[in-house]
Amino acid sequence: MNRRQFFKQAALAATLLGNIPGLAAAGQEAPRKTGAKPKQAGYYWFSVGDVDVLALSDGTLRSNAKLLNDTPGQVDALLRQAHASVPAIASVNAYLIVLGDRRILIDAGTGDLLGPSLNKLPESLAAAGFMPGQITDILLTHIHADHSGGLTLQGRMVFPNATVHVSRAEKAFWLDPANVAKARDSHKPMFAQARKSLEPYAVVGRLAAFEAGQDVVPGITSRPSTGHTPGHTFYVLESQGQRLVFWGDTVHVAEAQFPCPELAIEYDIDPEAAVRARQQAMEEAAREGHLVAGAHIAFPGIGHVAKAGQGYQWIPAPYVNDAIG
């Protein structure tokens, strides 16, 4: 289904939305004067060459994660300079690629693991006219809970017809019990979350590991970008001379890490490698001029990168409505 066929699914989407608890009622009633607001699911269509891509919001969260390598007050000053809140607000974005007869999801959101302001990916998909059963492939940039938690709900597969693809190094790290004892205390719960999310797919043969650099599905190439996790992976989509690189967790706090890419985050397994990977990714994007999709850059997380002083600048892609697109 491309955007021109989107309205053919309008009736289906209406049905799906009506079946999501609380969402139908929210759509029928104006927000009360008490300040209560309906939950906001979000999606945004755009194109890379002749391939349609859908940005999907899983929600936002106020992040208290500590950035590393900073000087006292540096991060707060950068946030205020960008008119951003302190602490920072991070988006959780996923992306759907419509490629031939495949419906390819890049990351799967948080599920019910990280709080009530998230887990909006199912609503965002439904609003765009898709059911979870239509997803054929899920490409994980890595196996942190905000990227893989949405794979399962109460031990069951949310995407029953999808094959989950993840780099072999990433799978080996998170699913090996021996690594739990060696991990920092703050990282230990992530191993149990990883197993909870992936095991239902592994049991039915729908968990596929690939070697870094391989084409994961026809038309999408993987590229290792390790540091944040041992198998953190970029995915590259190219069509008609245009390129989009899905960055995963290269950037967590855009207002600080673009001007100062040397700032790591406490969730990095190898902070020094993560800094190198970010600097390389930003330098390449600024030099080559290709589009970037960031999992935690303000929704829809699509844009370009430009050099700015000693660091870089994020340039969001202009909004294009279907009426002119």
Image: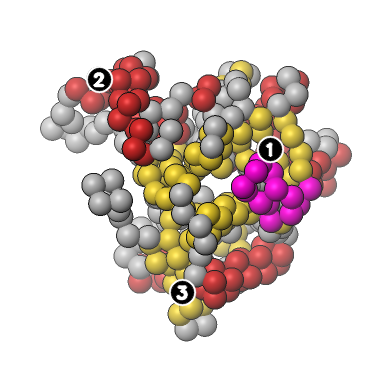
Q: Residue at x 61, y 27 (%)?
A: 162
Find out whether the residues at labels 1 and 2 contact each other: C-beta distance under 8 Å. Answer: no
Q: Residues within 10 Å of mark 2 (few under 14, many from 20)?
A: few
Q: Residues within 10 Å of mark 3 (few under 14, many from 20)?
A: some
Residue at the spot of label 3: 306
Q: Is residue 281 left or right of residue 84?
A: right
Q: Which residues are magenta?
A: 211-223
Residue at the spot of label 1: 165
Query: What amino acid type should be assigned to the residue bearing mark 3?
Result: Ala
Find out whether the residues at labels 3 and 1 contact each other: C-beta distance under 8 Å. Answer: no
Residue 178, position as x, y percentages in the image:
86, 39
Q: Residue at x 46, y 54 (%)?
A: 49
For the question of whether residue 226 can be seen, the reply is yes
Q: Does the magenta portion include 218?
A: yes
Q: Does the magenta portion include 10?
A: no
Query: What amino acid type should be assigned to the residue bearing mark 1?
Result: His
Sooner in the amino-acid sequence: mark 3 or mark 1: 1
| SS type, badge 1 | strand
Query: What amino acid type should be assigned to the residue bearing mark 2?
Result: Ala
The label nearer to you, 3 versus 2, is: 3
Instruction: Determine which of the numbered discs, if any, sits on residue 25 in the image.
Output: 2
Give the answer, above or below, for where 161 lies relative to 248.
Answer: above
